[in-house]
Image (cartoon, rainbow, N blue to C red):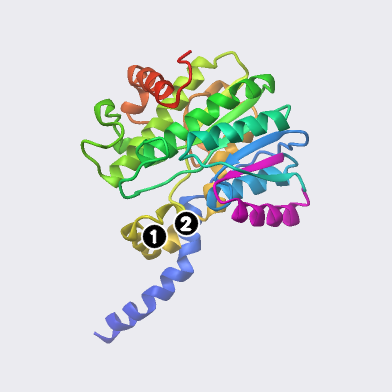
Amino acid sequence: MIGVLLLLLLLPLVLYIAAPHIRKMLSSRVCTSTVQLPGKVAVVTGANTGIGKETAKELAQRGARVYIACRDVQKGELVAREIQTMTGNQQVLVRKLDLADTKSIRAFAEGFLAEEKHLHILINNAGVMMCPYSKTADGFEMHIGVNHLGHFLLTQLLLEKLKESAPSRIVNVSSFAHHLGRIHFHNLQGEKFYNAGLAYCHSKLANVLFTRELARRLKGSGISVYSVHPGTVHSELTRHSFFMRWMWRLCSLFIKTPQQGAQTSLYCALTEGLEILSGNHFSDCRMTWVSAQGRNETIARRLWDVSCDLVGIPMD
């Protein structure tokens, strides 16, 4: 009995000591590309925190001119100064982008296109997770509106600049959760039935479908497109769910850091010779499989048309 009690008392200490090694074992893959980016321009959405911040920091470290596109400009400015100090790269800029408002998205794109001659890397990183039912400024359900439609519109508005700057890359941050997603066209805005967890999964499936259809349409353009699963990461993404915050704390010793979570986005943005795998899904810096729904070309094309109609851009 004493031995059992002693074991129980020592277990937290053992887990604490072992956790970094277990976490390293579970997430050992990192972006090993040595590519440098002087003269290159990158946009990272949601780069004022978490994975986006770490992605922007690494791109700046490699010499890129990096735009932090975020809703909270004040927080973005603090992060920009931090990155500038750490990397010595003063070309880290902050511009307001609210993906829950198409007017804000169009204003960001208009300003960027007037300001920059090139765009080489677009990282569609920002997102929301498990929000209570709510709508964007344009009446879209928040998950599909921010995670999919917002980035869909932003990408379309910047597409010509990406073509002019080719070779260029687009990285869409999705999730393993896309395996639980379905695209219910009759209930895309969640008005007939709604579950916060599933709404997130549906939007992450939309990211995968958008990636595959965009890659198909851009074949031969010099633009390559990838979707990524960053892993389970310490971030602000769980702020809307008490249960998820509790689970994250419970398992915190085994969850990836934002720096680790950024590795697959960086891998897809930087690795040479990856162009032939455009349209595919990546996790832990290697290509991985997607659900049957995520490979459905009919759904992907219909989602493209519906998305164009919702955000008010031509279908072709």
User: What label sits on residue 46 in the rendered view?
Assistant: none
Indicate the position of residue 90 as horizontal and vertical percent values: 77, 48
- Residue 78 falls inside the magenta stretch: yes
* Closest to the observer, 109 or 177: 109
Disc 1: CA contacts within 10 A as few (<14), some (14-19) or many (>=20)? some
Residue type (three-letter) at the residue carrying disc 2: His
Indicate the position of residue 232 as horizontal and vertical percent values: 43, 50
The residue drawn where x is 66% and y is 49% is 57
User: What label sits on residue 248 in the rendered view?
Assistant: 1
Say left or right for 36 vs 178: right
Mark 2 or mark 1: whose residue is earlier in sequence: 2
Residue at the far bottom: name it.
2
The residue drawn where x is 64% and y is 41% is 32
Eyeballing the image, is 22 above or below 42? below
Residue type (three-letter) at the residue carrying disc 1: Trp
List the residue tagged with mark 2: 234
Q: Which residues are magenta?
A: 65-89
The residue drawn where x is 73% and y is 36% is 37
* Closest to the observer, 138 or 262: 138
Indicate the position of residue 131 as horizontal and vertical percent values: 35, 49
- Whether residue 66 appears in this view of the structure is yes
Q: Secondary structure at mark 2?
A: loop
- Residue 102 falls inside the magenta stretch: no
* Closest to the observer, 218 or 139: 139
**Which picture quadrant has residue 294?**
top left
Indicate the position of residue 35 as horizontal and vertical percent values: 71, 36
